[in-house]
Amino acid sequence: MPRIAVDAMGGDFAPEEVVKGVARVSLESDIEMVLVGNADRIQALLDAGPYNPELISVRHASTAIGMGEEPREALRAKRDASITVATRMVAGGDADAVVSAGNTGACVLAAAKNFKLIRGVKKAALASVYPRQTEYPGQDVFGLLLDVGATIRCDAVELAQFAVMGSAYARRISKQPAARVGLLNMGSEETKGGEVLVEAHRRLRSLPAVNFVGNVEGNEIATGRADVIVAEGLLGNVVLKLLEGISEVATSLALQAAHESWRWRLGMAMLSSGIARMRDLTDFKTYGGAPILGFESLCIKAHGRSTAPAISNAIKVAAKAVRDRIAPEIADAVAQIR
């Protein structure tokens, strides 16, 4: 089984929830894990609840990077930070993948510093999964969006590579042999979006290994038209935060209305199963985390607000990605388009 290094000090609820999540996985699977962080604090938390000591070890890291710290400066000042130690472990062969719910920028930069880019890949991409409608039986209820923050601006070649990497990930993880790929744009016409997006559209259309369905507009993101949506990091991050915000606002408004009106309470009761389904889909605990793609080694970035269930799922995603040989799959796919 894969050995997963877990950044115990990363996230809004670290290390308590991270340790709980790791302990849960140790009782549910045979995945080997290494908790990286303040060793005394981690061990005290482990001793407070049940866990399988045969599957969990602890690697001390003297410091951690906070969620609000400037990533580059923090990594420079804190050379023994938990995310740095965890990525070094993977780079050195002491673990097969790293999971962190910590500072996103620090995760990306730590990976960039310690991991090698896959040959031919120009830039790594931070992916994210999101809930969407499905159009046919067996289609994954989650779409994949990349990049959502590892880059700011991209050129056409980089966007095309994101598509290839996303397709490879969907092929292995979601078991979609011909994942539909869309390019996020302001219109469906291939001439829309400026020089970079027009050229990216042309390149994607010419790649036989990519099932390109054309430009995807904002109102199509949550449909089943595209399984993988490609965007520059700035735009992708805005879309991701918008999706999260809409879900939270919709839930909050519905609960407020139900509190104020018996008619809404009756309606909520009648729609309870559908509401529960929507809540489950939009809850990041369901999918745990998403990968930084493009490196020879694997990093799974969990949501900053992850609690134990989300951490558990992120670790399982990491183990599955290692078992399914995501990095070699991406390397093979990228090699075919050079």
Image (cartoon, rainbow, N blue to C red):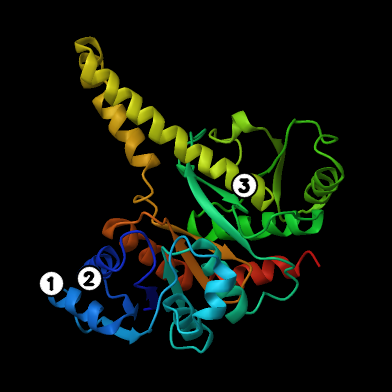
The kind of residue on which mark 3 rests is: Gly
Which residue in the rendered view is the most extreme toward the top? 263
In this image, 195 relative to 129: left or right? right
Give the residue pinned by disc 2.
23
SS at mark 2 in the image: helix
Is residue 324 visible in the rendered structure shown here?
Answer: no
Residue identifier under label 3: 236
* Residue type of the residue flagged with mark 1: Pro
Front residue of 35/211: it is: 35
Q: Which residue is mark 1?
A: 50
**Helix, strand or loop status at disc 3:** helix
Quarter of the picture holding the N terminus: bottom left
Secondary structure of the residue carrying numbered label 1: loop
Q: Residues within 10 Å of mark 1 (few under 14, many from 20)?
A: few
- Looking at the image, is mark 2 or mark 3 earlier in the sequence? 2
Frontmost of labels 2 and 3 is 3
Q: Position of residue 315 (x, y in %)?
A: 37, 67
